[in-house]
């Protein structure tokens, strides 16, 4: 091939090489920028965390077979049934003190110290708050609970990794009788008693034998008992 025909071919090759170099540089720049983009970094972290969770649960499925669970419980030296039985007794004792035995202001003033060791700080604080004396229209103070009718306690599934179990407490009670006035031309004094239920959801840590309050709901129904 003569010199006249060789130059255009070399020129075309140079152009192609130059274009390839430009494309490579552009791709490299975009790749570098994408690697420093905070959003991309965040997504990469989420994907990495998710992958870690998947691997954890896959391992857990293989590791936490019934026999392995029993081994883990034995290794932790936690007697789950005994812990549940003892904590159920503690809760019933504390609930009885609140709803059935707190009748005077003196009882109320001693209530926190009487139940705190068994029920923990958060649960105790809630119960003490619910038990505050009520001021009547005459200005007299009256304790809110008259009678404990029933208490039901149930424990959820034991989490061997966290050493915890959800605990559900349903309290059925009658309130003290309080005065009520019907609207009208003439006021008629009546006594009203509230029948209610308090429902508590707790987290029970078997490792340190502690309770913490997770949720609380109340259901009340008033009824006229005298007048």
Image (cartoon, rainbow, N blue to C red):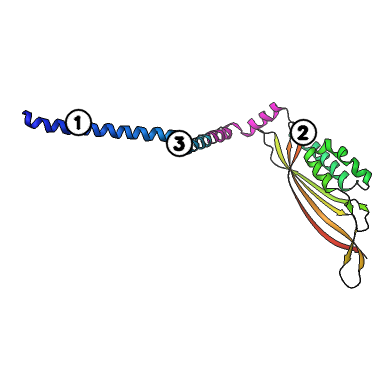
Indicate whether residue 74 is drawn in magenta. Answer: yes
Residue identifier under label 1: 14
For the stretch drawn in magenta, what is the main secondary structure? Answer: helix
Residue identifier under label 2: 209
- The residue at 83%/37% (across/down) is 116
Disc 3 element: loop
Q: Who comes first in sequence, dot 2 or dot 1?
A: 1
Residue 152 image offset from top left, x and y in percent:
79, 47
Residue 84 image offset from top left, x and y in percent:
77, 37
- The residue at 79%/50% (across/down) is 198
How far apart marks 3 and 1 lie (CA) works out to: 35 Å
Disc 1 element: helix
Q: Quadrant of the N terminus?
A: top left
Indicate whether residue 66 is drawn in magenta. Answer: yes
Q: Who comes first in sequence, dot 3 or dot 1?
A: 1
Indicate which label's residue lies in the foreground, 3 or 2.
Answer: 3
Disc 2 element: loop
Residue identifier under label 3: 37
Q: Quadrant of residue 34?
A: top left
**Closest to the observer, 103 or 174:** 103
How far apart marks 2 and 1 lie (CA) works out to: 79 Å
- The residue at 77%/40% (across/down) is 122
How far apart marks 3 and 2 lie (CA) works out to: 47 Å
């Amino acid at each position: 091939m003569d010199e006249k025909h060789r130059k255009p071919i070399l020129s075309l090759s140079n152009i192609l090489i130059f274009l390839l170099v430009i494309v490579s540089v552009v791709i490299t720049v975009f790749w570098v920028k994408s690697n420093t983009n905070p959003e991309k970094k965040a997504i990469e972290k989420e994907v990495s965390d998710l992958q870690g969770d998947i691997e954890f649960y896959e391992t857990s499925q293989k590791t936490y077979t019934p026999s392995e669970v029993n081994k883990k419980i034995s290794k932790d030296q936690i007697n789950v049934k005994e812990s549940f039985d003892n904590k159920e007794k503690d809760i019933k004792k504390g609930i009885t003190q609140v709803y059935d035995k707190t009748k005077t202001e003196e009882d109320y003033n001693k209530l926190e110290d009487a139940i705190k060791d068994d029920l923990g700080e958060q649960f105790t604080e809630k119960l003490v708050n619910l038990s505050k004396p009520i001021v009547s229209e005459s200005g007299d103070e009256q304790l809110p609970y008259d009678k404990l009718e029933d208490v039901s306690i149930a424990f959820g599934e034991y989490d061997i990794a966290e050493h915890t179990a959800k605990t559900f407490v349903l309290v059925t009670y009658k309130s003290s009788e309080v005065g009520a006035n019907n609207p009208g031309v003439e006021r008629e004094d009546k006594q009203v008693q509230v029948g209610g239920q308090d429902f508590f959801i707790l987290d029970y840590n078997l490792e340190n034998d502690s309770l913490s309050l997770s949720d609380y709901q109340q259901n009340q129904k008033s009824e006229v008992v005298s007048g």
